[in-house]
Amino acid sequence: MLSWLAASIHGLYKGETTSFVLAYVAMKLLLVELYARAWRDATNVRLFAGVYAVGNAAGAAIWLSSLLVPVPGRYGIWALALLVELATPMLAVRASFRDAEYAPRVFHPEHIPERYGLFTLIVLGESVLAVAAGTAGTGWYPAAVATGVFGFVIAACIWWLYFDYVGSSGLQISPRASFYWGYGHLPIYAGIAASGVGILLAIEGAAEATVHGNLGARAVLSGGLAVFLLAVSFIHWVNRGSLDDRALFARLATAGLLILLLALGSFISPLAFAALTALALLALTAFETLSAEVPTNPPT
């Protein structure tokens, strides 16, 4: 089903949405069947599994009904279906807390960060692929190669900032904080994906010897990185419960600098824009590394 879903994505650019919707509905119905089986066999999680089954079934029904609405109204129906699906986990967890025996096992702080981290690696891998594909597709033009190098530096900084400084203590605070932590990753993934596209566009612009970068390409790159930093800052706040942290303010300041670069980028080339963006992230990474708290008694 995932292969069917992936194969149908290309058709969305041509307005061919039927195959995509049917593939997605088939995948949701599979989840409904699994949760219905859990509801039937595992009596201690019946309420939890039942809410998930109903929520996924409702989402699938809304997705299927969107085929009756022409484009672009169909996309609004999709948004409604996604809203139902995003609300379902919160309703399921809230319902599960009526069962005092099951409630403490709703979240697994050791397992969830690993899953989110693996997905982050997958999305980040697309950025690295964009650097390689974009550079190879330009005939190794020197400016494009240099832009690709700065794009790789950006991807490396994203990796460092996420895996070294995005903690998971918020998962152990409360169910509400856990959902803030989890859903806060959605803009992280969106920002990383956008930055990968922005790097590819910058490489293509450098290969074309463009004197001034395209506004859309700059917005995708710096805007995506700014969203990533803001989302990381939000999760930082969820974990700490406080804004009193130098690293947090450094991320916010860097996000502001990237937005400023977006406004001033019309005066510089794609190569220079990529270089300044990479230097901004590199400076932030160095600051967080140097200002990290070192244990007084490190483990032996």
Image: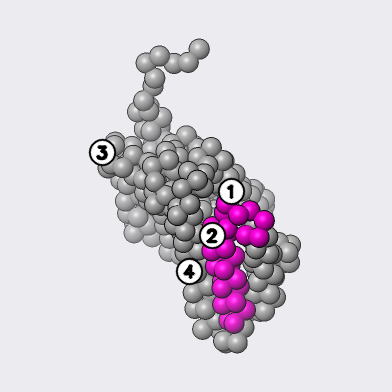
Q: Which mark is in front, 2 or 1? A: 2
Dot 2 amino acid type: Leu
Q: Label 3, on which residue?
A: 244
Regarding mark 2 in the picture, which secondary structure is present there?
A: helix
> Mark 4 packing: few (<14 Cα in 10 Å), some, or many (20+)?
few
Q: Hey, which quadrant is residue 29 in on the image?
A: bottom right
| Residue nearest the observer in this picture, 280 or 235 | 235
Which residue does the image show at 29% across and 37% down from the upper left? 245
Q: Earlier in the sequence, mark 4 or mark 3?
A: 4
| Residue nearest the observer in this picture, 294 or 273 | 294
Q: Earlier in the sequence, mark 2 or mark 1?
A: 2
Q: Which mark is in front, 2 or 4? A: 2
- Inspect this view and state whether residue 240 appears: yes
Name the image quarter holding the N terminus: bottom right
In the image, residue 250 sits, relative to residue 97, either above or below, namely: above
Q: Label 1, on which residue?
A: 119
Dot 3 amino acid type: Asp
- Mark 3 to mark 1 CA distance (whole Å): 29 Å
In the image, residue 260 sits, relative to residue 154, either above or below, namely: below
Residue 49 is situated, as x and y percent measured from the top left of the image, at 58, 59
Q: Which mark is in front, 3 or 2? A: 2
Which residue does the image show at 29% across and 36% down from the upper left? 246
Q: Earlier in the sequence, mark 3 or mark 2?
A: 2
Which residue does the image show at 50% across and 63% down from the upper left? 88
| Residue nearest the observer in this picture, 94 or 138 | 94
- Mark 2 to mark 4 CA distance (whole Å): 21 Å
Write down the region rendered in magenta.
39-66
Q: Hey, which quadrant is residue 35 in on the image?
A: bottom right
Which residue does the image show at 33% across and 39% down from the upper left? 240
